[in-house]
Amino acid sequence: MDEKPTTSKGFCSLRYGLALIMHFSNFTMITQRVSLSIAIIAMVNSTQQHGPANASTEGPLPDPLSNRSRALRDFNTRAAVYQWSPETQGIIFSSISYGIILTLIPSGYLAGVMGAKQILGAGLLTSSLLTLFTPLAADFGVILVIVIRTVQGMAQGMAWTGQFTIWAKWAPPLERSKLTSIAGSGSIGCVCCVLWFTVIYDDPMHHPCISTREKNHIVSSLAQQPSSPRRSVPIKAMVRCLPLWAIFMGFFSHFWLCTIIITYLPTYISTVLHVNIRDSGVLSSLPFVAASSCTILGGQVADFLLSRNLLSLLAVRKVFSFLGLFLPSLCAVALPFVTSSYITTIILLILIPGTSNFCDSGFIINTLDIAPRYASFLMGISRGFGLTAGIISSTTTGFLISQDSESGWRNVFFLSAVVNMFGLVFYLTFGQAEIQDWAKERTLTRL
């Protein structure tokens, strides 16, 4: 028994393989989501943004920037350019969030009742196929693009939400930050689907390849947490639970700024820093590299602090929530004042999503602490709050920058900092890490 924890916690275990596959699946979905944000720089005619929304033209376009590369001019001679205004782009960017919201709660509940494997796999496959049809949809008009993105969001909502059902059964409590951070820090989507349906199982008890040591380690570590395969959902108790609302407000604040960075970063780099599309694509990838690194680092540090009893679980959740909301706010407030410095601006743009992902070891996984039996269902609601913030922030950003670019971007970042501070104060005040009474098996009663 003394050797079991050491052996079962190694990286050569099935649950870490599960985290790695989930990492590539999440990486694929994020790529599918942000690819249009990068491509839209070349797709949109910035000199004629107020024409008909569905119009497109062929041929070379006037280049307003003297430092554009020759490759960019050659590209424009072949590419179709769509006259989509900033407001229209904001709707396109936010449409995927509309779709995710529609499926978050039902997919989270169904994943908890029916099993997450099929729901997650189907969502990933559908999202991957729809990505292939997006370029064709653009030729038929902006309405079809919005429809495709909305349905794609519904598929991604299915894939994202059910992950916490799996981790509720696969992740030992002291490894939750580590495993979920590895999984979340990231034609590939179809390959991931093959791996998903072949290798992934809803729980370790039914996996044919898991070792006895690892199975016993996972089962014994989760034995103290009550579970029930069929349960009613205590909606009234959830609505009255302030620690749960603290998580919801954290999600709302976190997604507000993150959605702006994910969807508008290429546009900001192109229009404010005047970088050509080739270099813009490279620079736009750097914040995601930082985000992935900080997610994994945060998970490792969080579980280290817990395993060594250096901090309590509540302290760890609040410390990482503070880092993930306060540091990006500082960077966002500083951005409008450093646009004259190319290097400083790039550094701040990298730090915003990087430091934001410390939240993954904070309130993001807090539902596993306070209500592990309802983690998937509550994650759906939490992401619903986050995606609502994303819809509002994307649409608001498009409106603000369409009025005046310089003051518009300044107002965007200042407003994001205010929203972040609201979520941080609310979570630090009401956040908890103990299992709530309504989430314990002995309190289950019909409403």
Image: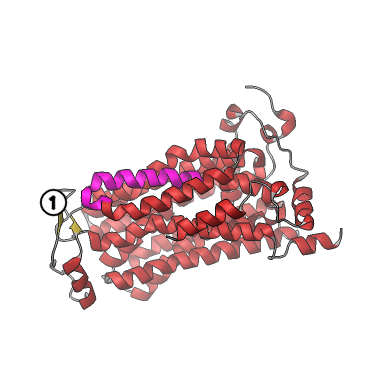
Majority SS type along the magenta span: helix
State the quadrant of the N terminus: bottom right
Q: Is residue 351 magenta?
A: no
Q: Classify 182 as above or below 201.
A: below
Residue at 33% x, 50% y is: 93
The coloring applied to the image is secondary structure
Give the labeled residue for mark 1. Answer: 51
Q: Residue at x 65, y 22 (%)?
A: 446
Q: Residue at x 13, y 67 (%)?
A: 60
- Residue 207 visible in the current orientation: yes
Find out whether residue 160 is within the magenta segment.
Answer: yes
Q: Quadrant of the C terminus?
A: top right
| Amino acid type shown at disc 1 | Gly
Q: How many marks?
A: 1
Q: Point out residue 204 in the picture as x, y percentages from the top left corner.
A: 70, 49
Q: Is residue 152 left or right of residue 325?
A: left
Give the residue at the far top of this rendering: 447
| Along the line of sight, the residue nearer the viewer: 367 or 232 | 232
Against 77, residue 427 (above or below) is above
* Mark 1 Cα-neighbour bin, 10 Å: few <14, some 14–19, many ≥20: few
Which quadrant of the figure has residue 372? Answer: top right
Is residue 415 visible in this depiction of the protein?
no
Residue 294, x across and y down, in percent: 54, 65
Q: Residue 253, image x and y in percent?
A: 46, 48
Q: Which residues are magenta?
A: 137-162
Spot the residue most to the right.
1
Q: Residue at x 44, y 45 (%)?
A: 155
